[in-house]
Image (cartoon, grey):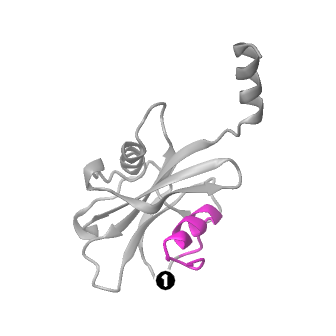
Amino acid sequence: MPMPVRRILARIVAPKYLVGAVTILHDSEAAEGEGRLLLLRQPHRGGWGLPAGLLKKREQPVVGAARELFEETGVRVQPDDMTAGSPNAIVHVVGVVDTVFFASVPASTTPLVVDGAEVLEAAWFPVDDLPRLSANTALVLGRYGIGPDAR
């Protein structure tokens, strides 16, 4: 089979995914066993969510996670200070793959800056008393033993 035909067939048959990066940001000052997470309220989500977004072309996932965290919250964390989740990738049924990273900052000295359009509000919540979460956020946190869908 000629190469152009094989390429066309491969594009038709192969699944396509959007790849995103998610940051689960902990408060480094929270007492042992009393963790807090940073969550966002966005106009297009039904519930609170995590800082996340799609990767740019050829962008490393950890770099994308740090970029999205900064763009959505004003919190700057260096990619070298982020830890990949295990599992690092979560496949959603809608053709989206999220790469997940963990980081922590001191909440009391870290200002949160939101734009009021893409992100309406950012706030810290106790892990054992989370607000209503978006479906994807509940799924992602649940994979790491956090929140109402913890496994």
- Which range is magenta? 131-151
Residue pictured at 76% horizontal, 34% vertical: 13
The answer to which of 96 and 112 lies nearer the viewer is 96
Q: Is residue 141 magenta?
A: yes
Image quadrant where one finds the N terminus: top right
Residue 11 percent coordinates (x, y): 72, 28
Residue 129 percent coordinates (x, y): 49, 83
Q: Within 10 Å of the Cα at label 1, are there few (<14), some (14-19), or many (20+) other Cα atoms?
A: few
Quadrant of the image occupied by residue 112: bottom left
Image quadrant where one finds the C terminus: bottom right
Tag 1's secondary structure? Answer: loop
Vertical relation: 52 (above or below) 55? below
Q: Is residue 117 visible?
A: no
The answer to which of 112 and 142 lies nearer the viewer is 142
Vertical relation: 20 (above or below) 120? above
Vertical relation: 48 (above or below) 68? below
Residue 34 percent coordinates (x, y): 35, 84
Please give the residue where the numbered disc 1 appears in the rendered image: 129
Q: Is residue 56 visible?
A: yes
Residue 50 appears left or right of 124: right
Residue pictured at 39% horizontal, 53% vertical: 73
